[in-house]
Amino acid sequence: MDMLLAENSPIRQQLLEQKLAQFKDPHLAHTLSAFIRSSVDLYPCAIEDYAQLGNSRLGGLPDLPVGMDYPVTLVGREAMLDVYAEEFDREHIIDCWREDWAEEDYHWDEAAQAFHVPMQFIGQLNCGELKELQSYLPREGLLLFFLEQWRFSGVLRGHVYYVTEGQKLNPGQAMPALKFDGDMCEIYETAYQLQGVASIKTISSHMISRQNPHLLRLAEARLHALPQSQQARVMEAIEDEDYDGAPEWQDQFYLPDKVKMSHLGLIPGQIVTQAQWAALADKQLSCWQKLITPEQPLPYYDGFASINDYGFSQHEAPEFHAASALGGNAEDYLVLLKVRHSELNNELNYIIHRDDLALGKFDRIYCIYDY
């Protein structure tokens, strides 16, 4: 039984039935159910005040276990010069700045002959808070997500650290100030507490194609008992995206609208308060007065981050790239965390192998943006 699929999640049966009811062809619905994931959407529910240790959090500072240093990337002098040369004349940097790098604003490691460049903290997930919503993450403990500063690494490289339950944590606010040029590092200025909601996620149908043979095989496996003529009709409907799934409520909003909604603490299933309703008036959302009703539960919309989602691509699936980089088969990888990242709200995927997740090993992570 595949724990990643919504059809094997008792708490998602109603969501799944509602989704599949959109399709008039039962064979098409059965085929697409192979791609509907048992996911968790994550929504900002409050500005982080760091009063609670080890809660689920987006941005800000991490609650590191005692004895763990803040993760850094080692960058040599020449590589550092190359980075700054993107914005300043190289000779000017050598004349005016090179000596300053050894001072208090930078952390030079003489033994390693490299600078310590702090990674960007993306967020942390409290597995105990989320255990009732899914069955594939560790049952307890904390997952910490970091991203190397791309301009210093030259590649997109993410790291995930698992902190077991019972380890003593240092509060994020108590962490010593990081030594580095803040203007050259991307950071989240505001930290948010996160709340999880059980959800389902469906793959973009155009990805079920010859560019992604692992997805094509999965669809064909669901159709093997049908006559060839029916198989062909279903596959044609998928390839042409010619099926009658009804538009969802959230499709009436633009992405910036949904980002604003999440920052107001609007969580699907919860009652929209009068204060939140009033705040919406200042956000200039499209059609919000017709779509959102005060003192009524909010319909579902995509969270700011999600667990066990799908990466999106116009070409090969992100999991395909993970398999090429780390080995194995694309179908054995999943998106551990998907999060809107950077000022452009690009969607960043942390991808892990199923076996590594089952073993609680998080040292092999592949990161890629939707593209």
Image: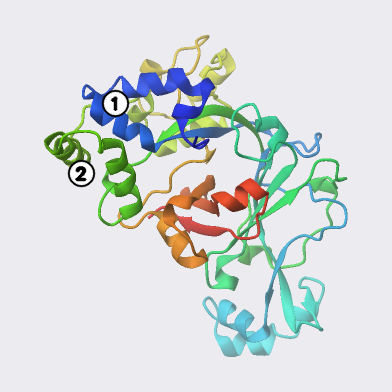
At a point 61% along the width and 87% down the height, the residue shown is: 92
Q: What label sits on residue 181 in the rendered view?
A: none
Q: Could you say where residue 76 lies in the image, as x and y percent from the top left?
A: 67, 82
Left or right: residue 267 compared with residue 32: right
Give residue 176's quadrant in the image.
Answer: bottom right
Residue 342 in view of the camera? no
Residue under label 2: 239
For label 2, the crowd category at 10 Å Cα-Cα, with few meaning under 14, some 14 to 19 and many 20 or more, is: some
Q: How many marks?
A: 2
At a point 24% along the width and 34% down the height, the residue shown is: 225
Callouts 1 and 2 close, C-beta under 8 Å: no
Left or right: residue 324 compared with residue 193: left
For label 1, the crowd category at 10 Å Cα-Cα, with few meaning under 14, some 14 to 19 and many 20 or more, is: few
Quadrant in which the C terminus is drawn: bottom left
At a point 24% along the width and 28% down the height, the residue shown is: 27
Residue 163 in view of the camera? yes
Residue ranking furthest to the top: 295
Kindly state the secondary structure of the residue where label 2 is placed: helix
Q: Could you say where residue 336 lies in the image, as x and y percent from the top left?
A: 56, 46
Q: Amino acid at mark 1?
A: Pro
> Is 38 rendered above or below residue 308?
above
Q: Which of the two discs, 1 and 2, labels the residue nearer the N terminus? A: 2
Q: Amino acid at mark 2?
A: Glu
> Is 339 rendered above or below residue 16?
below
Residue under label 1: 247
Kindly state the secondary structure of the residue where label 1 is placed: loop
Q: Could you say where residue 144 lies in the image, as x and y percent from the top left?
A: 69, 49
Report the coloring of the rendering: rainbow
Q: Could you say where residue 174 lies in the image, as x and y percent from the top left?
A: 85, 49
> Is 1 rendered above or below residue 187?
above
